[in-house]
Image: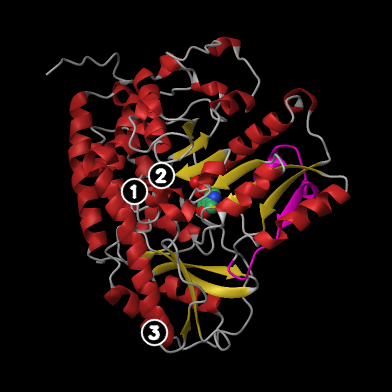
């Protein structure tokens, strides 16, 4: 074992030895494995929504800090982590049918640990040569599935398009729209925005899209909402009229956005029709596939994204349907030249490396320091194989279809649409029960975790089936709980807070 000589007594616990590291890992591994096992067996509440003050007390943060810095930290860290784990929601519990984040694969969690210990910032190539190579490999792996000219079975070194990984769908959407602006108006970086520009987005876009447009320096007046049908899909019959209205008002349309799929309902926009419309007017076509682009890896579901070949940019989260721990998102461009239109800046202290052999990613990314996200996804691929991921995605979509049948066949329950992904909205006796209040009271009990949303003024319960172990028995238990709801009569007002997404 290598000898470790701490530089001084004072620094001992900040410089740590490999013995401390191993001891801590051993203990914490056992604690985490126990957490995963207990969660999978539903032995603890899936969620415990105590007020923040009570959680802070429960965590005894001051008490723990008073005990800090004495002796080997392994025991103290392990004890605290075990306590902390009692305060988190449990995504491995089959009763978690909630937000869109994945039930993570442990291989991704291992990557988080490796990333934490290696801490390669990777803004510049020399700050993370391995991570940069891995990221490029993963981006090419993803590009294989986007029909931008290449054959899907072709080697990943010959794919068409370009892109990189970034910290989440929100930043990725912002980056895509920056590229759209820079392509449409090459002087916008120097001169600022043209106030006549407008972006056409569906009113069902994730809130981050509107936010991105405003961050770019535009205002809400630069956003033209595309009308959607009763299920929240773009009403393609209105595209031309919306465009003409913009021209008549002396606006200059820049880009059109579509969802694959929408956050609330999990339904896919008709990308082909929207893409052809964009092409016919020389507009940038952006597809927000943060949630649903993963369907591209499945022969059975790829057709949901027909028309993606027309897209100029695509956002694709791996932390939603592909088991990656948050965060891991790809922003992909049909034309690799788009990458140079995002930003037009140099930073002397980071170098100005445009060398394809040693690419510095900061030229393209919003982030400077960046987590090596490629490792998270690569380790999952290593652990499950491409087939494993495909089977998981298909199992989740299949489970959702089965749950839809189960719910539709039950008296009093209404599903207004057939799900296309792993997201499903439904109601129970909506004329008598305030769905939001019912949902909020049930999750307060800690036995089930699911979400709620509002579509065209109607309130819905919302499932995101993230776990193939969410059996009919689990769902039936929840449906019974909804049926038995005593009401406190749930027709009163609740906050009209909309689904925040994720
Ligand atoms: C369609 C869509 N776009 C963007 C986002 C935001 O992604 P992220 O949470 O990775 O920032 C979400 C999250 O729910 C989403 O559903």
Looking at the picture, how far across and down is residue 400, in whole percent?
Answer: 37, 67
Q: How far apart in space, not on screen, are marks 3 and 1 (Cα)?
A: 31 Å
Name the secondary structure under disc 1.
loop
Name the secondary structure under disc 2.
helix
Q: Is residue 203 left or right of residue 355?
A: right
- The quadrant holding residue 57 is bottom left
Looking at the picture, how far across and down is residue 450, in whole percent?
Answer: 43, 67
Residue where numbered disc 3 is placed: 409
Residue where numbered disc 1 is placed: 323
Do we see residue 283 in this rendering? yes
Q: How far apart in space, not on screen, are marks 2 and 1 (Cα)?
A: 7 Å
Residue where numbered disc 2 is placed: 318
Q: Residue at x 24, y 48 (%)?
A: 32
Query: Which of marks 3 and 2 precedes in the sequence?
Result: 2
Instruction: Judge whether 118 appears above or below 376 on screen.
Output: above
The stretch of residues the image draws in magenta is 211-231
Q: Residue at x 37, y 18 (%)?
A: 129
Q: Is residue 133 left or right of residue 266?
A: left
Query: Which of marks 1 and 2 precedes in the sequence?
Result: 2
Q: Are marks 2 and 1 in contact (CB under 8 Å)?
A: yes
Q: Nearer the viewer, residue 11 or 228?
A: 228
Q: Residues within 10 Å of mark 1 (few under 14, many from 20)?
A: many
Q: Nearer the viewer, residue 2 or 324?
A: 324
Q: Nearer the viewer, residue 372 or 151?
A: 151
| Callout in the foreground (3, 1) | 3
């Amino acid at each position: 074992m290598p000898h470790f000589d701490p530089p001084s007594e004072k620094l001992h616990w900040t410089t740590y030895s490999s013995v401390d590291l191993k001891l801590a890992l051993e203990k914490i591994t056992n604690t985490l494995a126990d957490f995963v096992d207990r969660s999978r067996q539903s032995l603890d509440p899936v969620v415990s929504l105590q007020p923040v003050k009570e959680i802070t007390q429960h965590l005894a943060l001051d008490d723990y800090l008073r005990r800090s810095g004495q002796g080997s930290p392994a025991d103290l860290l392990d004890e605290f982590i075990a306590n902390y784990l009692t305060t988190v929601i449990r995504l491995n519990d089959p009763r978690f049918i909630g937000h869109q984040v994945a039930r993570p694969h442990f291989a991704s969690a291992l990557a988080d640990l490796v990333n934490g210990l290696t801490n390669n910032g990777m803004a510049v190539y020399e700050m993370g040569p391995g991570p940069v190579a891995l990221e490029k490999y993963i981006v090419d792996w993803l590009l294989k599935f986007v029909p931008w000219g290449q054959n899907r079975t072709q080697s990943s070194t010959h794919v068409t398009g370009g892109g990189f990984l970034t910290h989440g769908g929100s930043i990725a959407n912002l980056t895509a729209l920056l590229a759209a602006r820079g392509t449409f108006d090459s002087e916008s970086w120097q001169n600022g925005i043209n106030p006549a520009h407008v972006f056409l987005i569906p009113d069902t876009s994730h809130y981050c899209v509107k936010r991105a447009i405003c961050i770019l320096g535009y205002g809400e007046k630069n956003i033209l909402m595309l009308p959607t049908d009763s299920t929240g899909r773009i009403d393609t019959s209105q595209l031309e009229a919306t465009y003409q209205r913009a021209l008549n008002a002396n606006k200059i349309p820049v880009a059109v956005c579509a969802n694959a799929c929408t956050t609330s309902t999990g339904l896919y926009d008709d990308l082909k029709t929207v893409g052809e419309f964009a092409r016919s007017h020389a507009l940038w076509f952006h597809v927000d596939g943060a949630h649903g682009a993963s369907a591209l890896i499945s022969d059975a579901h790829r057709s949901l994204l027909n028309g993606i070949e027309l897209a100029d940019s695509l956002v694709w989260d791996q932390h939603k349907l592909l088991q990656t721990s948050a965060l891991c998102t790809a922003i992909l461009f049909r034309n690799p030249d788009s990458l140079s239109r995002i930003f037009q800046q140099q930073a002397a202290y980071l170098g100005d490396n445009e060398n394809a052999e040693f690419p510095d990613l900061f030229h393209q990314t919003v982030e400077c320091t960046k987590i090596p996200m490629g490792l998270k996804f690569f380790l999952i691929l290593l652990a499950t194989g491409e087939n494993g991921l495909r089977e998981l995605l298909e199992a989740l979509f299949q489970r959702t279809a089965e749950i839809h049948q189960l719910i539709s066949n039950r008296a009093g329950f209404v599903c207004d649409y057939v799900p296309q992904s792993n997201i499903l909205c439904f109601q129970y006796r909506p004329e008598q029960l305030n769905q939001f209040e019912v949902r909020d009271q049930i999750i307060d009990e800690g036995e089930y975790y699911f979400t709620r949303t509002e579509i065209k003024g109607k309130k819905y319960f919302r499932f995101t089936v993230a776990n193939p172990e969410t059996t009919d028995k689990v769902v039936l238990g929840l449906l019974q709980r909804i049926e038995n709801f005593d009401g406190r009569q749930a027709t009163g007002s609740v906050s009209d807070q909309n689904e925040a997404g994720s």
